[in-house]
Image (cartoon, grey):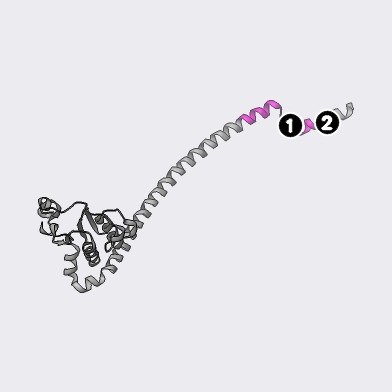
């Protein structure tokens, strides 16, 4: 047994194994080295992450602008296609006048909603609807649906017109037309707000008289 132990000690000495103190010192050195390397790595990753986010954000912004431009071109192409017959019939100058026209329609019932629909399809860009009545399920006007029951006729008409041509500006005044408020309702107060055409599409004699 003593010979075996002596042989093992000689073998260990010949291998020159490090002492415990040496191992602990080496471990501390490696840990400090690893900590410094990790800090550099984390700093590098944070910097790279920040740069990558900035790049991605800028790229997303450019893509968003490109998408908006593409959507705008598609919308313009769609409008041009929808109004192509009107443009061909009226000519370039006539079509431009129709596009820039401001039309006020008093009454958004059967006659008024039908007139508004035709005007929008012809290319009129701005329409004002004046009516205080509501849709009745048994008396739907030209563009109303049964689901619009109880909704102001002018609002029901506006929604239908915007479905036809979303770029159309449809103003809604849920108000009965009266002579005392005619200037405000028709836009006669300011010169710049004067309508090009006023359509009387009311269904009762008293409103027509006013």
Looking at the image, which residue is at 44% across and 46% down?
52
State the residue position of label 1. Answer: 17
Quarter of the figure with the C terminus: bottom left
Q: Closest to the observer: 38 or 186?
A: 186
Looking at the image, which residue is at 23% across and 57% down?
169
Looking at the image, which residue is at 26% across and 57% down?
158
In this rendering, the answer to whether 115 lies above or below 10 is below
Residue 39 drawn at (x, y percent):
52, 35
Q: Main secondary structure of the magenta part?
A: helix
The image quadrant of residue 146 is: bottom left
Within 10 Å of disc 1 (Cα), the crowding (few <14, some 14-19, many 20+) is few
In this rendering, the answer to whether 9 lies above or below 179 is above
Residue 73 drawn at (x, y percent):
31, 62
Q: Closest to the observer: 88 or 205?
A: 205
Q: Is residue 27 magenta?
A: yes
State the residue position of label 2. Answer: 8
Quarter of the figure with the N terminus: top right
Left or right: where 149 falls relative to 178: right
Left or right: where 175 falls relative to 143: left
Looking at the image, which residue is at 60% across and 32% down?
31
3D distance between C-alphas at marks 1 and 2:
13 Å
Q: Closest to the observer: 10 or 128?
A: 128
Residue 127 drawn at (x, y percent):
20, 59
Q: Is residue 128 magenta?
A: no
- Magenta residues (range): 7-28
Residue 26 drawn at (x, y percent):
64, 30
**Which numbered disc covers residue 77?**
none
Q: Secondary structure at mark 1?
A: loop
């Amino acid at each position: 047994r003593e010979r075996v132990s002596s042989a093992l000690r000689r073998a260990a000495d010949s291998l020159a194994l490090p002492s415990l103190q040496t191992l602990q010192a080496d471990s501390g050195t490696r840990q400090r080295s690893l900590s410094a390397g990790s800090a550099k790595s984390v700093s590098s990753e944070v910097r790279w992450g920040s740069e990558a986010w900035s790049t991605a954000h800028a790229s997303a912004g450019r893509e968003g602008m490109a998408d908006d431009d593409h959507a705008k071109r598609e919308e313009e192409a769609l409008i041009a296609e929808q109004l192509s017959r009107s443009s061909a019939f009226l000519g370039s100058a006539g079509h431009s006048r129709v596009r820039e026209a401001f039309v006020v329609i008093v009454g958004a019932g059967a006659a008024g909603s039908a007139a508004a629909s035709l005007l929008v399809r012809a290319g009129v860009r701005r329409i004002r609807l004046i009516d205080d009545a509501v849709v009745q399920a048994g008396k739907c006007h030209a563009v109303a649906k049964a689901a619009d029951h109880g909704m102001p006729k002018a609002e029901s008409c506006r929604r239908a017109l915007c479905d036809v041509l979303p770029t159309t500006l449809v103003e809604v005044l849920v108000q009965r037309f009266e002579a005392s408020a005619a200037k405000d309702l028709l836009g006669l107060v300011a010169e710049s707000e004067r309508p090009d055409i006023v359509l009387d599409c009311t269904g009762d004699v008293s409103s027509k008289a006013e």
